[in-house]
Image (tube, rainbow, N blue to C red):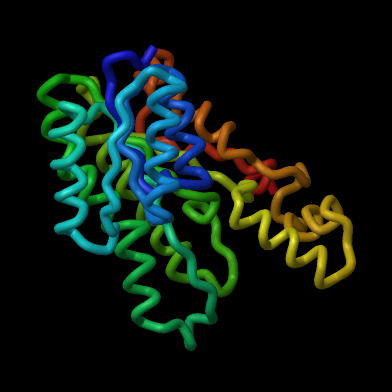
Amino acid sequence: MLNGKTAVVTGSTSGIGLGIARALAADGADILLNGFGDTSEIDRLRRQLSSEYGIKVAYCGADMTKPADIERMIQTANRELGKIDIAVNNAGIQHVSPVQDFPVDRWDAVIAINLTAPFLITRAVLGQMLERDWGRIINIASVHGQVASVDKSAYVASKHGVMGLTRAVALETATTGVTCNAICPGWVLTPLVQKQIDALAMRDGLSNEDASVKLLGDKQPSQTFTSPEQLGALAVYLCSDAACNMRGVGLPLDGGWLAQ
């Protein structure tokens, strides 16, 4: 379905972003990977994706806190892949602290990566999408774009902001072939979360399964994690013709979190 399309996926060298990049690649899209990590491992990943799916894969290690880096990433994608049809704003960070103790530098970093970067990327790619009258902007928000949790003020504020940005862009492009939507995951089983499960199991003497249930707590009623592959499948759907009139929505993949 996505043969001839190109996608920029931020934070895609591991976890959710990599799951989405793989799914788009499997459907034929050329990919620009972005993120941090071991250079040789990223090069291996790039070559693996290219060989496995028969696509072009570029890479840019742009820092999402730096507007000049974001501009460089967009230029790299246009130069090496020819254009940008799909932008997936996935890169994100978290910091946990009560509001009265929240470090201002951590607030600034969370807002910069989680909210300002999606705005800058959208601003940079929207013109060419409108010229071709086709484009997909997919923001990876969170259930925290809809509800709050304690000690996560910056993250919750940033993700609520992402939902506002998603809706505003959707309205501005409503009569065009460009759509803007968000995906709102709950707990997702990434390598980082697996480390939390392993640490909890060791600390409390639990099995891996019991530690998973304890981590999910009462937030995710399904008591199961969402996988990066499931999020990737939803991103592919949002790129399809079936979703062409889906505009400005936040799709939860949260095991019932928001149903409570």
Which residue is rendered at x = 37% and y = 42% of the image?
Answer: 43
Q: Nearer the viewer, residue 106 or 219?
A: 106
- Left or right: 198 with respect to 103? right
Depicted 150 relative to depicted 156: above or below:
below
Question: How many labels, in total?
Answer: 0
Q: Position of residue 156 (x, y in %)?
A: 47, 62
Which residue is rendered at x = 35% and y = 30% of the image?
Answer: 247
Residue 79 falls in which quadrant of the image?
top left
Depicted 112 relative to depicted 24: above or below:
below
Identity of the residue furthest to the bottom in this view: 101
Q: Position of residue 175 (x, y in %)?
A: 21, 23
Which residue is rendered at x = 28% and y = 59% of the image?
Answer: 63
Which residue is rendered at x = 44% and y = 47% of the image?
Answer: 41
- Left or right: 167 with respect to 76? right
Residue 148 falls in which quadrant of the image?
bottom right
- Can residue 145 be seen here? The reply is yes
Q: Position of residue 22 (x, y in %)?
A: 47, 30
